[in-house]
Amino acid sequence: MKRLPALAFMAMLSAGCASNTAGVGYYWQSVSGHLKLMQAARPVDDWLADEAAPSRLKERLEKARRIRQFAVSELALPDNASYHRYADLQRRAAVYNVVAAPALSLTLETWCFPVAGCVGYRGYFLESDARSFADSLDEALEVAVYPVQAYSTLGWMNWAGGDPLLSTFITYPEGELARIIFHELSHQVVYVQNDTAFNESFATTVERLGGARWLNRSTDQARADYATFDNRRRAFRALTRSTRERLKAIYEDAHLLDDTKLQRKAVAMADFRQQYERLKAGWNGYAGYDPFVAAANNATFAAQAAYDDWVPAFEALFEREGRDFTRFYDAVRALAHRPKEERQAALRELAPAAFAANHHDCP
């Protein structure tokens, strides 16, 4: 067990463990939670050779293996130890994130950690711990706790086996499984401290582009299943985006008193839920977004924005680089080295039409 201290230290860094100000308890849950996850992982080959492993699981692991190979050969994503092992966590999420925002703002509260820098969420391996922390926050904040099916250690743990495939997402339909693997691997390509929107929008862009390429070579059924999923997601995200813009306009209107802002916010949120019910009526009983809608507040809207805001700019950059992933990554790295204000200005210039109507700096 000579490697355990080093493993614990790296787990602390990569899983977002706390600085001294966050307390020893947070440090310990991050270290112990990540160690348990790593220890539960076994090589995919072992699972495939295990006669007791369900045939459905083996089929999914074979699919994930092909997706992993595709990520390297077609998307130029890292060829390393990540996603060559699998862990059955026997729970519904890998971690639970806590997010918080003021009542009249879409700016997330941030917490700062080694390696990851300052981020707009705080992760816990146990839902009970996440909810306890959420309950401890200032009552003036709007708070949410949500499950996360995968997280990236940014490549720091590849020496110890890398990020494993997890039971929390291995059963996803083919297109979604491919996208989540591509997304998490993207964080090992480029990661900028203190810029969650840049990091997540970049990874979302890679997952979309890569997912489309993967599905082009897959079966008609896989493409049809994914089209159904993606159409729902696009419609829902269009609704949440328009609601965010409406809320932002209310909050930033200097002519309104806070009481008036709160009244208009309540109307906007009621409209959001009514529009969602109309959307859902055409989804043949699908209710996957119900938990988001039930808990929707400034914190959840702001957290979702990080995954979407810069995607049009990154897609434009991909086109500019001739749809070549290696060139695209090099261009993204060049952006990553620029100061944040310059980086955001460059992103807006890449897709001016996308940002003209709602010009602002992403959180």
Image (cartoon, helix red, strand yellow):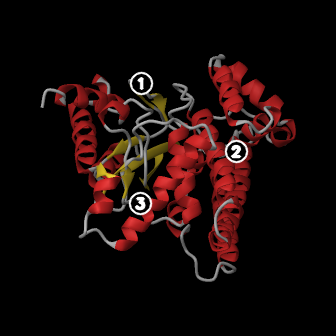
How packed mark 1 is, by other alpha carbons closer than 10 Å (few <14, some 14-19, many 20 or more), is many
Disc 1 to disc 2, how far (Cα)?
31 Å
Give the amino acid at mark 2.
Answer: Lys
The residue nearer to you, when weighing 54 against 118, is: 54
Q: Is residue 154 above or below residue 84?
A: above
Kindly identify the residue that appears in the image at 30 percent across and 59 percent down. Answer: 47
Q: Earlier in the sequence, mark 3 or mark 1?
A: 3
How packed mark 2 is, by other alpha carbons closer than 10 Å (few <14, some 14-19, many 20 or more), is some
Give the amino acid at mark 3.
Answer: Leu
Q: Which residue, given by chain and number where applicable, does mark 3 sit on?
A: 61
Q: Is residue 338 left or right of residue 253?
A: left
| Residue 195: image location, x then y, percent | 57, 29
Question: Which mark, by number, is residue 281?
Answer: none
Residue 337 in sight in this render: yes
Q: Is residue 60 left or right of residue 197?
A: left
What secondary structure is found at the residue carrying circle 1? loop
The residue nearer to you, when weighing 81 against 306, is: 81
Quadrant the C terminus occupies: top right
Kindly identify the residue that appears in the image at 66 percent across and 44 percent down. Answer: 205
Q: Is residue 74 above or below residue 55?
A: above
How packed mark 3 is, by other alpha carbons closer than 10 Å (few <14, some 14-19, many 20 or more), is many
| Residue 117: image location, x then y, percent | 46, 25
CB within 8 Å, label 3 to label 1: no
Q: Which residue, given by chain and number where applicable, does mark 1 sit on?
A: 115
Residue 9: name its quadrant: top left
The residue nearer to you, when weighing 40 against 344, is: 40
